[in-house]
Image (cartoon, rainbow, N blue to C red):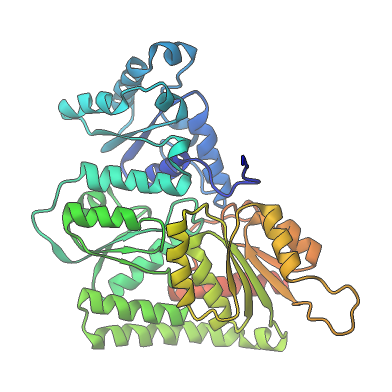
Amino acid sequence: MASFVEKPRSACALAGALSAISALPGVIPIVHTSMGCGGNLSGANSFGSGYWGAGYCGGASIPTSAITETEIVFGGGERLREEIESTLELIDGQLYIVATGCMTEMIGDDTRGVANDFTAEGKPVISVSTPSFKGDSYSGYEIVLNGIFNGYLKKAEKINPKLINIFGIIPAYDPFFRGDLEEIARLIRALRLEANTFFTPDQTFENVKSAPSAALNIVFSRVWGTSFAEEFKKTHGTPYWATELPVGPEATDAFLSGLAVRAKVPKRRVKEVIERENDIYYGYFERTADVFCDSDFKYYAVTVTNSNYAIPVARYAQNELGWVVLDVFVTDQLHDFQKNALQGAFNESGLNYADLLFETDTSAIARAVTERRPLNRGERYFDAYSPLFILGSSLEKAMAQKRGSAQLSISFPAFNRMIVDRGYAGYRGGLHLFEDIVGSLVFPKG
């Protein structure tokens, strides 16, 4: 039976590819598809991720073949060749990635062949296949990673035992990706290790090129990036660790302990880091305890996020805030094997009072919350699950207003807030999330 996605929370594979390529230092996207796709998708990426912006060679500046009816009939290979030549001449970059759209894939353009012609001439050009029928934006992220790290980069001659690559945190579709990556990198460096984040402003193309020499890949996702990491392991011999993004002190303590074992960090060193970070965290936290406790900010919680944030945020609400988490909605469009992987992690998360639910459509999520947690209609003995706090996206604002619930946008699309370097990962991120949650309660925007 035919169906549609109501108010989608991601775009096509090309959109995910563009968000990843445009966040990488020295990497230039070249879109080979019909006119308008590149700019429109880049705009969706920017606005939905808390106004991330276009950056260098993004948005309306993305080079594109912009094929028309002529190329659709006679083929767009020569038009693509012209576009690559002009891009190489006019735009500085260290790697140029041709990303395809639906139309050029359907007419059968030999995009890889054109890119290989430039590669044969010693020019850094590769291609990736990213039409919408290859998947959504999360799939586009993985396709780009495979094209660069498992296709373009060669196996390292020597392994750096201290270097760790960070994957699974997806530009734009994890709106806090920059802040999260920076906090994770800070913690890794606190253990006297080195970190490649790839997508933060402090990185260069040298970080990309050094990836095969890493001793470990960390994938902060149970579903996105794991197949890529498995292929990376086959190509470069690098082991990987798939785990949840740590949010707050309890989860971050466990993450650092787990990393220390895998990276062979002395126990004394990791203990010192954990103790120091906890002292700082609770030194700030205790100053806020009065308003949190005296105001009786005890809530039921429903989370509506992508798969990467689902377990970390729900666990933070339960373990750090002491809230009762009721429903954990995952909005990604997942295959059964991906759902099973996430469900397995959820079963081990300690979220004993919550249910994991897979739903994308905004109205279906609102309907499910209403049916599972109905409002009090005047009955004397009735558990109304109130007060309720909804941690979701901008699309949950209407549901929150209808129920009289508090709401905070922490997932894509986040139209109603600006996100610069804020993140919720780690110790500092836990404080940021606490600040944003309590701030929305003491000064609701209405």
**Rendered view: 292 above or below 58:** below
The quadrant of the image that shows the N terminus is: top right
Q: Can the viewer see residue 93 in this picture?
A: no
Q: Residue at x 67, y 67 (%)?
A: 390
Residue 364 x %, y %: 69, 55
The quadrant of the image that shows the C terminus is: bottom right
Identify the image quadrant of residue 323. Answer: bottom right
**Rendered view: 313 above or below 40:** below
Left or right: 161 as drawn, with respect to 322: left
Q: Residue furthest left?
A: 157
Residue 123 x %, y %: 20, 30
Left or right: 423 as drawn, with respect to 208: right
**Rendered view: 318 above or below 398:** below
Q: Which residue is drawn at 67% across and 59% down?
A: 365
Query: Is 285 in front, or is 127?
Result: 127
Query: Is 172 in front, or is 15?
Result: 15
Q: Can the viewer see residue 208 in this picture?
A: yes
Q: How many marks?
A: 0
Residue 176 x %, y %: 49, 59
Left or right: 295 as drawn, with respect to 91: right
Identify the image quadrant of residue 405. Answer: bottom right
Q: Residue at x 69, y 71 (%)?
A: 389
Residue 38 x %, y %: 48, 32
